[in-house]
Image (cartoon, rainbow, N blue to C red):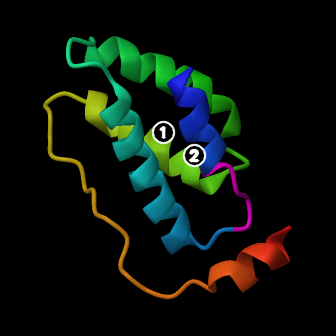
Amino acid sequence: MLIARTLNGLQARDLSVERAQELGQMGYMQWLGTLPADADYEYEAVRAYLAAMDFIETDPAIAVFCGLIRDSLRKPMRPLDLAMPKARRRGGARKRRLLI
């Protein structure tokens, strides 16, 4: 299940608001990129939301991801506010080792 891989990558609880926003947007773009060209977007979006909704309260990046899905299903349609993260140093390998 491709949504499971995306959600797994978004599960982190101790994120700043800015980092959660970045990860949630990247997760949405990743999920969107995995959809087949002939997929029914509304059906897939509802499926992804239902798979993620149990983590909204505990994982901020998943809350952002779900917010983007909700916004994408609203009528009338509006462009989503999506952006790639700003380039900056985040601690590299040393920081990742400290998280283990």
Give amino acid for label 1: Cys
Q: How many numbered marks does the figure carry? A: 2
Q: Is residue 16 visible?
A: yes
* Depicted 47 relative to depicted 59: above or below: above
Residue 13 magenta-drawn? yes
Query: Residue reaching furthest front?
Result: 93
The x, y position of residue 71, in whole percent, is: 31, 38
The residue that appears at 14% across and 33% down in the rendered structure is 77
What's the CA distance linking mark 2 and mark 1?
6 Å
* Depicted 28 relative to depicted 76: above or below: below
Q: Is residue 56 left or right of residue 98?
A: left
The quadrant in which the N terminus is found is top right
Secondary structure, mark 2, is helix
The residue that appears at 73% across and 59% down in the rendered structure is 13
Q: Are marks 2 and 1 in contact (CB under 8 Å)?
A: yes
Write the start and end of the magenta stretch as one range. 10-14
The residue that appears at 86% across and 67% down in the rendered structure is 100
Give amino acid for label 2: Ile
Give the residue number, with chain letter if any, for mark 1: 66
Residue 85 magenta-drawn? no
The x, y position of residue 4, in whole percent, is: 61, 29
Q: Is residue 70 visible?
A: no
| Mark 1 burial class by Cα count in 10 Å: few <14, some 14-19, many 20+ | many
Quadrant of residue 28 in the image?
Answer: top left
The x, y position of residue 30, in whole percent, is: 39, 42
* Depicted 37 relative to depicted 52: above or below: above
Give the residue number, with chain letter if any, for mark 2: 62
